[in-house]
């Protein structure tokens, strides 16, 4: 599963630290998310999407 | 208080507790380390609530779960193998037997605890039956503790007296084969 977290975060000029605070997780989790090394729960995906002013389906790209 | 400050205080507590425990063992005072550990845990719990920011998130819990399962498996394997080795060597040194029994029971208790806690979170924590399940588990552990105390209290056992094995109570197993000294 790919995602556009880093892309949108850069566009909004938000730091990883700030995004982590907004989503209620540690900064390391944002790092892993951006690198595609961690699949978030539905709640975290929603929280990150809200923080980046987008929706889950636009933020995460599901591939078969 | 931020997370870094909390972690520094926690490290300080661990160092102080380690020093107190080691000194208490030297002076054979076992009350002080227990009291210090209880106080330390309470203080750290209070301080933890004052930390601003996220201390652990869902990724930490997932990682913690995986680490806990692996730790239990590794401990269980080491304990069981050590237990059989010590049981095999008990004829050379009878002191190995209580160590082997302790390892066996600690492994059983650890696995039992893991099983009941896993079942609680996996099934009962979200239902109305959680209080019933908790009461059942507490009753089960109480019963096991009573049976354990009864079995290991030495009430019904063989005692070594004047070079001979003498019945104490009504043991339902034969006298030990090892020489009574």
Image (tube, coloured by chain):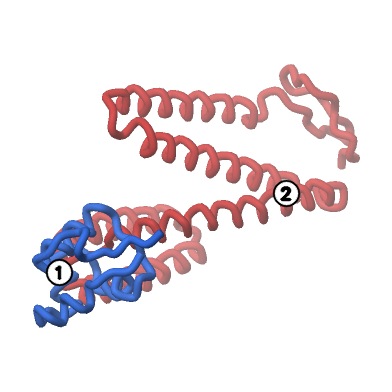
Is the residue B85 above or below the residue B158 in the image?
A: below
Is the residue B157 above or below the residue B96 in the image?
A: above
Foreground disc of the pair 2, 1: 1
Look at 38% across and 70% down and name the residue there. Answer: A37
Query: Disc 1 sits on a residue from what chain?
Result: A
In this rendering, would A42 be left or right of A36? left
Chain identifier, colour red: B
Mark identifier at residue A21: 1
Choose top left, top right, bottom left or bottom right for residue B163.
top right
Q: Crowding at label 1, few (<14), some or many (≥20) Cα neighbours within 10 Å?
A: some
Residue B110 x/y as whole percent = 53, 44
Mark identifier at residue A54: none
In this rendering, would B38 be left or right of A64? left
Q: Secondary structure at mark 2?
A: helix
Q: Which residue is mark 2?
A: B83
Is the residue B94 above or below the residue B146 in the image?
A: below
Residue B86 x/y as whole percent = 77, 51
Query: Disc 2 sits on a residue from what chain?
Result: B
* In the foreground, B107 or B129: B129
Which shade is chain A? blue
Q: Crowding at label 2, few (<14), some or many (≥20) Cα neighbours within 10 Å?
A: many
């Amino acid at each position: 599963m790919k995602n556009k977290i880093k892309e949108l975060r850069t566009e909004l000029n938000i730091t990883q630290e700030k995004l982590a605070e907004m989503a209620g997780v540690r900064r390391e989790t944002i790092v892993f998310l951006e690198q595609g090394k961690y699949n978030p729960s539905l709640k975290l995906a929603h929280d990150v999407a809200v923080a980046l002013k987008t929706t889950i389906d636009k933020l995460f790209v599901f591939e078969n | 208080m931020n997370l870094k400050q909390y972690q520094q205080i926690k490290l300080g507590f661990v160092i102080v507790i380690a020093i107190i425990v080691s000194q208490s063992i030297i002076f054979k005072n076992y009350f002080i380390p227990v009291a210090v550990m209880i106080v330390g845990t309470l203080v750290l719990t209070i301080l933890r609530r004052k930390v601003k920011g996220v201390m652990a998130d869902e990724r930490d819990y997932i990682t913690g779960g995986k680490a806990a399962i692996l730790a239990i498996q590794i401990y269980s394997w080491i304990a069981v193998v050590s237990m059989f080795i010590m049981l095999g060597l008990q004829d050379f040194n009878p002191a190995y037997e209580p160590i082997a029994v302790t390892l066996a029971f600690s492994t059983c208790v650890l696995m039992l605890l893991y099983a009941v806690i896993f079942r609680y979170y996996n099934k009962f924590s979200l239902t109305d039956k959680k209080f019933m399940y908790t009461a059942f588990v507490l009753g089960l552990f109480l019963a096991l503790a009573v049976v354990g105390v009864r079995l290991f209290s030495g009430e019904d056992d063989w005692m070594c007296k004047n070079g001979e094995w003498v019945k104490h109570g009504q043991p339902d197993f034969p006298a030990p084969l090892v020489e009574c000294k």
